[in-house]
Amino acid sequence: MQLMTISGVVVSAVAYLVSRKLGIWRPLVLPVYLIFLFFLCYGWIIQGGLSGSIVYYFFLFICASIIVFPGFYKVLAFLLVCSLVPALIFFEIRNPNAIVPYASAGQRYLDVSIALIVCLLTIGIMTYIVFHEFVRERTAKNFLLDSVIKEKERAERAVIDNQRLLSMISHDIANAVFIIQGNSQMLLSAHEPDRKKLSYRIDGITTGAKNIQEIIDSVRMLRAIDEGKETLQLQKVRLDKMLDDVRLLFTDRLERKSVSLVVQQPGVEQCTMLVEPRIFCNHVLSNLLSNAIKFSHPGSSIIISADTHNGRSTVSVIDKGIGIPRFLLDRLFQPGKKKSRKGTADEFGTGLGLLVVKNFVELFGGAIELSSRSEDDFPDDHGTTVSLHMKSA
């Protein structure tokens, strides 16, 4: 019987190794199951039948059948083993001479003791193997689940980023479209514009169209950077040159609200920064100036100042407008939070401007600082100051 037990262990080990090697185990279940059934039936005859230790192995085999087989096959395996035991008993009663008896009671007890120990060891080994496989499969499933979750989060971030990018494009192109529409309407309404005004309006339309093209180019560049096809190239630029381009875009809006733009010299002339020129001009300065005009009262002024110290350039846009209420200050840089409001002349606002500025300033290795005093809380001294701390060139 001990030889049969060792043979069963060897068969189990070989089946386990083959299943791990091939990556499948179900086709091996039935052959191994039948081999063990043969061992048990043969062991019944040579191991004293009911007087032997073979009955314990049948109990172990019933447990293994319930564990290994799925669903309906579990019931069939259980019934097969349970029906095989009465059949063997009936065979032993009808053919008592076919059963090999024990030589003595001591030999029987020795065999039963060894059988119990082998049963316990086998159960322990099977439990360890099953638990090990369970842990391995659970680890693989957890890894797969984590991968799926990360991919889902990446896809969701991509959707949010695309939506944000689309909002930014719409927001920033709107300024240029406003310039083109304004100059086109002025040309259509003028009966006989003089050459100087005609040239000015055409320059405005050209600048607006150029601004739209630069915004589209910068968006394409950002997409290429995200995809790893390009790297962000920062350039040395002068603040006063970029302000000249931005001023031309907002001349009509400044005149329409009678708001003056004051550029403090010589700080602005001396300020040079490391930025991407198209993005800084069309997405950063344009948004800051657009917001300042939108929330300024007619007849007020907007101040642009600059200072360079210890390798950092600070650019500030200061207005004396209605300011930002306290409940909005914490929301300004939080995506998805409602923060839009109308300007002093009922201009439409999206609430995206400062968030766009913050994203791009941080992309250039800079930082944004905001301070504001609401007109409701400070009726005599109100307004907003936005300061950009950039790398100096």
Image (cartoon, grey):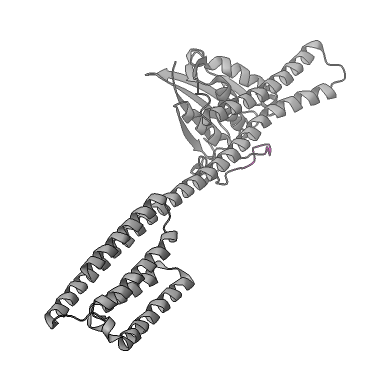
Which residue occupies 37% across, 79% down? 84
Give residue 389's quadrant in the image. top left
- Residue 239 in the image: state x and y as whole percent: 53, 17
- Residue 167 in the image: state x and y as whole percent: 62, 37
Any part of residue 383 in sight: yes
Q: Nearer the viewer, residue 221 or 27?
A: 27
Q: Give the residue furthest to the top.
A: 195
Which residue occupies 62% across, 21% down? 246
Q: How many numbered tags mark residues here?
A: 0
Q: Describe residue 276's horizontal placement relative to residue 260 as left or right.
A: left
- Residue 65 in the image: state x and y as whole percent: 38, 71
Q: Describe residue 95's horizontal placement relative to residue 203 as left or right.
A: left
Q: Nearer the viewer, residue 55 or 378?
A: 55
Stretch of the chain drawn in magenta = 340-348
Q: Give the residue furthest to the front.
A: 97
Give residue 104's quadrant in the image. bottom left
Which residue occupies 29% across, 64% down? 8
